[in-house]
Amino acid sequence: MGCSYGKASAIQELNQIIKQISLENIQLEKERDKLKSQHDDRPEEEKDSLQDLRIMHSDLEKEIKELKDIMNDFVPQGEAADPTNMTVKAGIEKITEIQRELEEKSQKIRDMITKREEIKKEHESLESLINETEKQIADLEGAIESQEETLKDQENIEEKLQMFEKEKSVLIDELREAENIYKDLSEEVKHWEGDENSNTAEKHSYEALLSLSESDVNRELKIVEKELEDLSSQIKDLELKEAELQQMDNYIASLQSKLSSNSKNANIKQQILESQERIENLKHEKKKVKEEVTKLRRFTSITQDGTNGKIQALNEILERRKIAGDSSDRSEKESIVSDVEETLKRAKEFSQNMRDR
């Protein structure tokens, strides 16, 4: 009777062990299926881990099968089956050993799963770090290319500044030459005004003017009209040259604004201001010439029937002829104007070349 009770206790304990092993087996099968579903997306080291899991699972199934065989030995087979206590004890010890081995293998499996998760996290972290490093490398390459382009532009700017300095000196020399020519013209105009004031006090007598014939008066008037036309033509040329100088002034101002960031351009700015002041002086002189021409035109517009008008017109004619001098002085003035035109032409070509660049 004692043997029957011990056998029943052993069978009950074995049933509990079998249930526990079955539950663990079901859990392991679920993990196995999950690992199989993720197998294709795993790197080589994880595939090796899965292979080890399969081997361990096969060993576990074999041991479970052996355990079932052992349990079958404990199952009563009828009245004939009557195992001894020693056999029951040996079977229990073997089951305990198998259970311990199963627990160790389960712990190994759990450790491998944990290690696999850690490897996966490290892999993702390394991929993120690699992507970030590649992005930083790309940014550095872009910054290096930008710095290289900036250095090239700076080298080109230095070369252009040197070229501008040379061409600026040439332009300044030409402007100075033009200024000197205009100064000469200004002095000559002042000389004309001085002669006009001095000649006003020394007008010809009324009798000498009356002695001139009508044909002489008409001839002198025609000469004066021709001179007025020449002066008008010269004034138009001066206006055109003034417009060209204004264009050059605007271009120089734009060039000044582009180069204002460079400390080397302080002298250029000062020289440009001086050039603008010189141009204003030239405009003032031109205005004086215009006023003189207007006054001459006003005198010639007076009717030729009045004697006083004739006398006044003849006085202006004689003064103008006296100031103008001989033909050699006129040719000298034309030469000066020609030099001014040549200088302006060269300045215009220089301005056009600067725009093209």
Image (cartoon, helix red, strand yellow):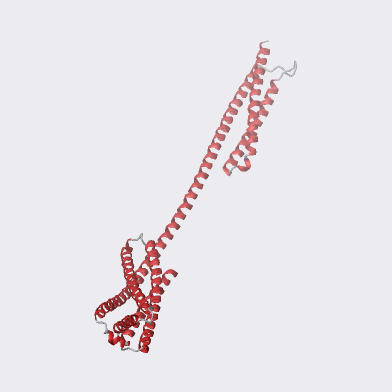
Residue 301 horizontal side relative to residue 60, left or right: left
Q: Where is residue 319 in the image (x, y as percent from the top left)?
A: 29, 82
Residue shown at 63% from the left, 31% from the top: 28
Q: Position of residue 198 (x, y in %)?
A: 24, 79
Q: Where is residue 245 in the image (x, y as percent from the top left)?
A: 38, 71
Residue 74 horizontal side relative to residue 317, left or right: right
Any part of residue 120 in sight = yes
Any part of residue 357 in sight = no
Of residues 355 and 327, the one drawn nearer to the viewer in this rendering: 327
Image quadrant holding the C terminus, namely bottom left
Q: Where is residue 35 in the image (x, y as percent from the top left)?
A: 62, 37
Image quadrant holding the N terminus, namely top right
Q: In this view, does 261 lie above or below 240?
A: above
Which quadrant of the view contains residue 261?
Answer: bottom left
Q: How many labels does the image show?
A: 0
Q: Is residue 89 above or below residue 121?
A: above
Of residues 197 and 140, the one drawn nearer to the viewer in this rendering: 197
Which quadrant of the view contains residue 332?
Answer: bottom left
Q: Is residue 70 above or below residue 158?
A: above
Which quadrant of the view contains residue 259?
Answer: bottom left
- Residue placed furthest toward the top: 1
Of residues 160 and 275, the one drawn nearer to the viewer in this rendering: 275
Residue shown at 58% from the left, 41% from the top: 46
